[in-house]
Image (cartoon, grey):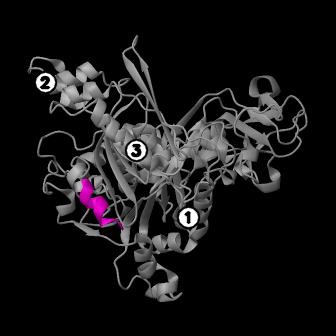
Amino acid sequence: ILTSAAHFAVLTSPSTRSVKLTLQTSTKGVEGLERITNKLKDVFAPSTGNTIQDVVNESRIRWSLAYRGWRRPFSAENRDPLLDDLGDHVFSSELISREVVSAESMFQRIDILDIVNPRHVDLDSYGRSLACDDDCYESQNPELFAPNRIVFLDGVMQSTSRGEEAYHEALVHPALFTHPDPARVAIIGGGEGATLREVLKHGTVRHVKMIDIDQLMVELSDEYLPTWNDCSDIDGSHESCFEDERADVLYEDAMAWFLNRFSEASVGTDVEHLYQSEDKFDVIISDLLDPQDTVEFAHILYGSDSFVRSLYHALGDDGILIMQLGPAAALEDPAEEITANRNRAGLTKMIANIGFKSMHTYEESHAGFNDPWEYLIACKSYSCRERFYASSAQVELSIHKRIRRSRSGQSLLKYFDGATLESYQRPRKATETVHCRSMPKPPECILGTGYSKDRQYFTSAEHLEMRSSVDGSSTSVYAKANIPRGSYIKTAGGSISIPPHASELVSASSSLLKTAAEADSAITLFLNNHGARSKLKGGSEWYVDTTGLTAYMKHGTGTSSNVARLAYQDFSVRNPVLQRRITSYATGYVMALRDIFKGEELIINHSQ
């Protein structure tokens, strides 16, 4: 059948007992094709009233979608949700999709689908999970074979039942455990209720203000996404997280809400009189659209200096802001300033300029998306680093003390624990690599990010020697060859580190000793004289070269020194290079500050 606006063709294949339908339209768009395909599904796979048989029947239907010829440039005005993630699932040739609900609010199109992916869930196993007797494995563990429920907003995937716990635990708990005592929390967005659920697990939290502009989204989530907002297992909470007495859900424009209360323009520039209409928050969690989104609001949201500044003013002295930043950087990506990640790049610079003292990005790869997901923590106080870099044991203790008990007796945290936070503490290689592709190149990237053929390397074994004084009371280090300025001198590789919490124990034990002489204990003297101290992790952390190379170098300051450790005292808001390489920078290399000649003594800059 061929018309001026569309055509419909039927091709039968008796040998494979299949029918191929081709639909093409030039006037109705993808939405028109969607209505037709739904009607065809009713014809070729009508509902039998039996869930298992319906899934089997639907599994025999495969769709594929192609957008041919010239098209209008993509924009918010002509955005077609079915040409985004939603269409990839509805018109997939592999996935089996069933619509749970589709609705249009004043602000966005909302779609919730159940997806069965035969690659992950065998259809026969899914059928047995619904129908076989209690003796089969599938019926005893039906949650392992259930369809993946996925939420789409304007066609963009937002959350999945198989990944939402990993996503929301990664969004909430690193920030809340980094704060010493989070009592007041604000959530921007988060209409599914899962962010709220995770916050309410903290016993210290007394008030949560969730601000989402779309009331229909919250209502549909309450009805169709019950596990997302289920607080029934949290001791002292309510069956629905939205009904918890600590929760205050507002259906407002969150950007306007903060600007009206915390922007300098709304109350004048006298900072002393800010915050009169609303108490400040300990943690603010932004769970809004991705920075990579092309709609105009994404550029406004992530490019608004006044909005981010209002969030800064809305936080207390130890306040923490956390945001989801979309797909994490890949190793092959160019500088983010010139890609779809330009909003993310601009945001991180803006946060540093506004006054946040510390910033950390980390990734979670189990969030249910096609890529690892990136998150950002920004702290008003540099001291938050000590809690962000807490050891696994310290975090486990905090979890035990702070997380509320469950009614079931099971842990309320499925993915997050002390080891998880430790894995977030060191940026990934791709994060560092893409950071160093920025223009102009960040100074920490010029200093060095590992082995470089452009830089000369000297080793302690071949190019240095230790000499004792005539009376044997001291030892010094001398060059056995000419060493040009900027060269790296590699140690033998042995090192130890004493993290901040252990350094505190050393200091405390020294202060408890009876006399001043005893207080200058051997270990304290050794660290002060021969260790490299860093406050990258908030508190004092010591790194010691156990090979003796740097330990036996004489100390100098300024122009009197000719070598320096790479682990300089860096207090920049964000430095993924140093965060990744602190150990090797502190004890693996020293750098020649000027030309060093054969026979010259090496004097290390100890004023860093």
Kind of residue sitting beneath label 2: Ala
Sooner in the amino-acid sequence: mark 1 or mark 2? 2
- Badge 2 density bin: few <14, some 14–19, many ≥20, Cα 10 Å: some
Mark 1 touches mark 3? (CB < 8 Å): no
Image position, residue 272 (x, y; %):
46, 86
Q: Is residue 513 visible?
A: no
Kind of residue sitting beneath label 3: Glu
Q: Which residues are magenta?
A: 213-221
Which residue reaches farthest top? 15
The answer to whether residue 288 is above or below residue 15 is: below
Q: Is residue 219 magenta?
A: yes
Residue that mark 1 sits on: 296
How far apart are the alpha carbons under marks 2 and 3? 31 Å
Marks 2, 3: nearer the viewer: 3
Sooner in the amino-acid sequence: mark 2 or mark 3? 3
The answer to whether residue 181 is above or below residue 129 is: below
Camera-nearest residue between 341 and 207: 341
